[in-house]
Image (tube, rainbow, N blue to C red):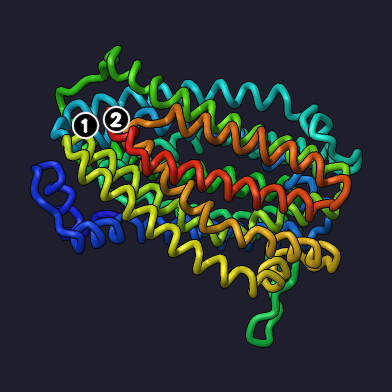
Amino acid sequence: MFGLKNNGSDKLLAAIKNGERLTFGEQLYLTMMLSIPAIFAQVSSIVMQYIDASMVGSLGADASGAIGLVSTTTWLFGGTCVAVTTGFSVQIAQAIGAGKERDARDIMKQGLIIALCYSIVLLLIAVSIHKNLPGWLGGDEGIREMAGSYFLIYMLAVPASMMNGIAGGMLQCSGNMRVPSILNIMMCFLDVVFNWFFIFPDRSLTLFGRSYTVFGMGLGVDGAALGTALAQVITALLMLSLLLFGKSVLRLRAGEGIHFFKRHIKKALRIAVPVGVEQIVMCSAYVMSTKIVSPLGTIAIAAHSFAITAESLCYMPGYGIQAAATTLVGQSVGAGRRYLSKHMAWLTVGLGVVMMSIGAVIMYFAAPAMIGVLTPEPKIRELGTMVLRIEVFAEPFYALSIVASGALRGAGDTFIPSCMNFVSMWLVRIPMSALLAPRMGLKGVWLAMCIELCIRGILYFVRLKRGKWLKME
């Protein structure tokens, strides 16, 4: 299964490296072939999160609120992991584009070791703050212990999550979208299976007229965290094995030791630090949003969390295309083909805007059903549906920012985008949310989000249009 190849896309990637001309049709074909596996992985991830959230939602509003309270903090930790992944995977794409496969393998080995050490530091921080975190976020007394326990168990798997993310990112930037996609789909499936046994107690299941007792541990919210953690560990082991010993150009070779080169580490820092700052800016803003929502009550926290999960179905295809954009632009830049880099950037952005605009139309009409799947609580359903319909109007602009950021990263342009995200999040969304939440409730928070995403998309469009990013590397 994991050895499947797409000879068409492999040949076109080789054509980029060899300086051969690609027609518009070939560029579109290559973009689609790299995007589709990543899109399926992203969408399947959200589908499984839907199932996951509905399992927890059946436990009641407190359980949903506990997970929703700390979810933005898990994003913050995960966002800094993305920065480390970007610092090394972009270099790999550029090295492969330049035909320097030995350099790509050296970068890979350095990246894996540094990422593992970094993830251990994050784990220690998470262990030290898990008890106090729910109180810092303004959570109700009744859900603080539950939320802290969930956060601790979830974060115990952060080294596995880091290894899965960086190994998958490296495979993607080498042009192999299929293996990471297949494994991430598998991880989502495992998450749901494990949750089925960990969350609920023993229960009866009737099948073909006969009743069976299904084993369950009855761990509730802790079970949801444990299921996710175990799925990440298994997937990380497989992802690393296929990166290091599979058929990729990055696989280990006899006689090639582990060497730390100052130039690779310096370049990783130059790319990763702005991305890390960007992720901290973005995710800390999400944490602040949670603090703004928390005083609105457990119902609002749960509706906010479920609406974010529902919206993910619309924007996950954008993140799939973003991965393709980073690979295509990175390899084109590495090959010294800046004109092709520009074409690939605009092509992937256009594809992302079209797909997410279609998703937005569907989401507007399907909003009640999308929220209804996640919770049986009528008040949460009503509020979640209302705010989700506000967000759909920003999706085309959100698509532009998502895919453009991937293209800019492929060229090594990370500093200016991080500044743009700071401006949009902290100077637009957060002040506007704080102003509107007391007056309009959760509706005001999502209206501020919609306006900010539109502004962010415009900023990315201007950055891409001006073309200064082509001179970054």
Residue placed under numbered mark 1 in the picture:
95
Q: Nearer the viewer, residue 252 or 106?
A: 106
- In which quarter of the view is residue 50 placed? bottom right
In what element is the residue under mark 1?
Answer: helix
Q: Which of 181 and 406 is in front in this view?
A: 406
**Residue 100 at x, y percent in the picture:** 15, 30
Q: Please identify the quadrant where the C terminus is shown.
A: top left
- Using residue 76 as the reference point, say whether residue 181 is left or right of it: left
Name the amino acid, label 1. Ala
Q: Nearer the viewer, residue 49 or 222?
A: 49
Name the amino acid, label 2. Gln
Q: How crowded is mark 1: few (under 14 residues within 10 Å), some or many (20 or more)?
A: many
Instruction: Tell me the residue at 51%/58% (across/down).
Output: 396
- In which quarter of the view is residue 348 placed? bottom left
In what element is the residue under mark 2?
Answer: helix
Residue placed under numbered mark 2 in the picture:
91
Q: Is residue 178 visible?
A: no
- Using residue 285 as the reference point, say whether residue 61 is left or right of it: right
Residue lying furthest right: 141
